Image: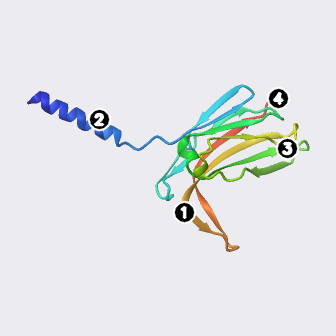
Amino acid sequence: MRRGLALLLAAAGATLAGCAAPTPPNVTFYAAGKTAVTGPAQHCDVLVENCTADTEAHAVLRVPPGKPLQISVDSHIGETPWQVVFRYRDAAGTPIEGRSAVFFGESQRLAYTLRLPTDTAQLETVEIQQFGGVLAARQDGGVDFVTRGTWVLSVDDRR
């Protein structure tokens, strides 16, 4: 009887462990022969209602001017709409912001290579944005998807 109860409790524990919330997805950044991985700085459910934030979650990676940055996202990001938002400095030191196209989930795109427009441009920061299933009205009458997850890369620009 005790053995049967012990087996039942062990099975119940295994079932509960299997029901635990999934681990938030990671993003991997690669440049100049080095890799950095980070979890989300913010991550919400698809309706952007239940959110968690981690102010310590970010990656740091050296990305020399003129070198591409390769980005790999977890399949849980790739199956949803996502985008790369970035900032860099041109040769004169002027900050410039940019963004990739939005990759839609049906394409299952799991990678992107960020190339800046010139070999002297210095990347400063990159943010991967995963969009949720909620739309927000803009003042101009259009709509935007609400960001449900963000993954941040800070660039170490030592030369």
Residue 134 - label: 1
The residues bearing labels 3 and 1 have C-alpha atoms spaced at a distance of 33 Å
Q: Is residue 44 left or right of residue 60?
A: left
Q: Earlier in the sequence, mark 2 or mark 4?
A: 2
Expressed as whole percent of the image width and height from the top left, the position of residue 99 reads: 73, 51
Residue 14 - label: 2
The answer to whether the residues at label 4 and label 1 have Cβ atoms under 8 Å apart is no
Q: Is residue 123 placed above or below 133 in the rendered structure?
A: above
Q: Image quadrant for the C terminus?
A: top right
Q: Amino acid at mark 4?
A: Arg
Q: Is residue 59 left or right of residue 155?
A: left
Q: Which residue corresponds to the image point at 61% horizontal and 41% vertical from the top-left?
A: 110
Q: Is residue 90 placed above or below 156 in the rendered structure?
A: below
Q: Amino acid at mark 1?
A: Val
Residue 159 - label: 4
Front: mark 4 or 3: 3
Q: Residues within 10 Å of mark 4 (few under 14, many from 20)?
A: few
